Amino acid sequence: MKIDIPLLYQNLLSELGPQGWWPAESKPETLLGAILVQNTNWQTVEQSLANLKQATQFLPERITSISLEELEQLIRPSGFYKNKAKTIKHMFTWMEDHQWDYQAISQDYQNDLRSELLTIKGIGYETADVLMVYLFDRPVFIADSYARRLFGWLLKEEFKTYDSLYRLIQLPDDFTAQDANELHALIDEFGKIYLQKNSKQTIPFHREVFQKK
């Protein structure tokens, strides 16, 4: 059993409207948010980003030059701050080595970009795919927890790991990076409304509509 991704996308878009993600004014801010949001909620990320903006204005050279200890304190609200600070340092150093040239990075690594990102200490599957979509404009499916809940409901199947769903979903060939961006945002917003354990909202779709053999 497979899911009709374009139909799901259009129904989510009709139900929820455009989401306008990622909530950032620059790609360095997007990169920071993608790391900080690991294992926490966006409210805590906003606190850390506010601290970072005040201290660095999100300028890469300022973030790479501040001490690890200072960075830890700035991002402390997001939790796991010691590991996240190290990941930020590793990622910003890697980007600096590549002159922060997103297009050149994407062209140089081609199909190996995801694998390369995964070699950076602290970057896991979900963060790598978020960066693929929001930093490097690649049409990639992000199999985060809300996606696993939604597709678990659609397919009457449990997806316990990121990879178990990621390997199953293939985006249409004509999907753009913006489509992948919007799909991810819509799935997460849908999950927050309808797929929380304590949600009293009735899912407005019948799962059978999206299933195809």
Image: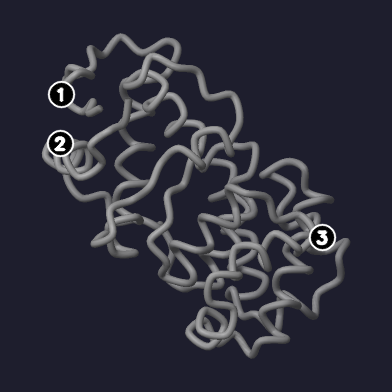
Q: Are marks 1 and 3 in contact (CB under 8 Å)?
A: no
Query: Where 174 falls versus 160 (above or below)?
Result: below
Q: Are marks 1 and 2 in contact (CB under 8 Å)?
A: yes
Q: Position of residue 139 (x, y in %)?
A: 38, 61
- Circle 1: is it few (<14), some (14-19), or many (20+) Cα within 10 Å? few
As measured in the structure, the alpha-carbon distance from the residue carrying label 1 to the one carrying label 3 is 45 Å
Applied colour scheme: one colour
Q: Residue at x 73, y 86 (%)?
A: 97
> Residue 63's quadrant in the figure?
bottom right
Which numbered disc covers residue 11? Answer: 2
Q: Tell us which disc is closer to us: 1 or 2.
A: 1
User: Can you identify the residue that label 3 sits on?
Assistant: 86
The one nearer the camera, 211 or 63, is: 211
Q: How many marks?
A: 3
| Residue type marked 1 | Val
Q: Position of residue 29 (x, y in %)?
A: 54, 67
> Residue 115's quadrant in the figure?
bottom right
Between discs 3 and 2, the one toward the N terminus: 2
| Residue type marked 2 | Asn
Quadrant showing the N terminus? top left
